[in-house]
Image: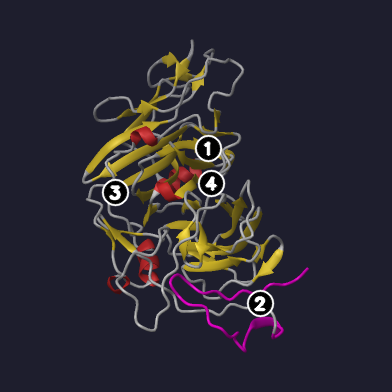
Amino acid sequence: MRKLWLCVFLLQSVALSACDDDAPGGVAQDARVITRADIAPIPIYLDQGPLADAQVSDAAEGLDALMTADGGATDAAEPIDVATSIDTSPSPDQGPPAPDAAPIEPCPAPRDGRLGVRIIDLDGDPLLPNDRIRVEMEIMTDAPSAAPAWLGLQNLGVIIDPLSGALDGAPVLLPEDSPSYISVPLEAGIQPGLLSYEGHVHDAAQLAVVIGVLNLQDGRCPNPRAASGAFFQLLGRTGKTPVCVDLNDFSSIQIAPHVERKNTSSYDEANGRREDLIADDFIFCPESPKIVHSTEFCIGETAGTRVSLAGSYKGDDGWEVDDFMLLEILRANQLINAASTSQHHTGGSTFWCGDVGALMCESGCIATLYNTDSGDPIDVLTPVSESLSSPPRWQRDGEVRVDGLFPGDGQLFQLRATALDVGVEGTIQPALYLLIEPA
């Protein structure tokens, strides 16, 4: 198998014409080597738009923010003004180029192609500090193109193993010091394929974040609606991140991992419960649900998008959350919208609840979350099947829409997605994604 050594150049950096003499592994002089450049800043987005490079901090500050006690994100009760973001848009006009600078080429026409990203916890859920993870980034296209393309990788809270990379089975050497943004050339253009690499979660991270962009020029010109990402909470931590994404640029975002059906007491001890909620109309006694997984990030423009829940980035099967997936929209001291998935049971349960002195769900029930203070029910997202043979929580990909919860005014907001369990066992099968499509 031919070995491909890739040192990496970063966003808005320039590839050098010569190879490092110190290329690892005694690489031959004619081997394909791309030299390493300095870490470029991560653009910062305000409500007014992106700032110029001179005004933004180094990428390391974005990582520092990710590791603060609140994950670097503005608290849900505060206005959301600033969020660091991967730059998935063409480079903004920064005035005329210097006299000796080459003019910026216009972006090529869009091509058929998109990415699908997933994170796999190699040590098994729940995700813990220093856990080994595997990142898979699939390139999908129905019309392959041989024109040049690049994969842009953004990693926050993840320390990459530089020797673990592989592109369609050919080894790829990633940067040893794991910069936040990595650009990997696709020499064959946009073809069906898979980039994978391993690493471990930083011991101070609140959230592991991986974002992939399919660029038509190096570091710029993202293919429309081709980006994909994954946001994973570390057990016992807030799950917040300052990263802000424009859903118009993405095809999918993984918001929850695969969780095997198991006892959820460890999540209860580490993550706690949502004491502001009560799960009722259920086969168990009314109780506040346990937090199994929670992730919170910033979303920008959503016009023209259809957003639904799916079990994979391909959106070709189904998914299950035992017991609830709660989606909340927050902005400026306010929870402005919320809804959850639900489940139905056909009844016949003989579970006796001493707290209410009755058998639960004798003749059928639809599990519902209620606000503890007001007693109001949380809206239900899930279409409740009437089929007695279907699993009570299983949903088809794309069937449960969530874009109706979004404000729709083009302003930034926080999306908090929380998997909740009642009783003894819980599961997320096979995982959970936002599936993003043109409206």
Residue at (33% x, 59% y) in the render: 72
Lateral position of residue 209 relative to residue 143, left or right: left
339 or 407, which is in the foreground?
Answer: 407
| Labels 2 and 4: the sequence-earlier one | 2
Q: Secondary structure at mark 3?
A: loop
Q: Which residue is mark 1?
A: 310
In the image, what residue type sits under mark 3?
Leu
Residue 2 included in the magenta stretch of the image:
yes
| Labels 2 and 3: the sequence-earlier one | 2
Q: Which residue is mark 4?
A: 257
What label sits on residue 412 in the rendered view? Answer: 3
Query: Would you call the spot at circle 4 few (<14 residues within 10 Å), some (14-19), or many (20 or more)?
Result: many
Rendering quarter of residue 220 = bottom left
Query: Would you call the spot at circle 3 few (<14 residues within 10 Å), some (14-19), or many (20 or more)?
Result: many
Query: What are the residue bounds of the magenta stretch?
Result: 1-29
Q: Which residue is mark 2?
A: 32
Q: Secondary structure at mark 1?
A: strand
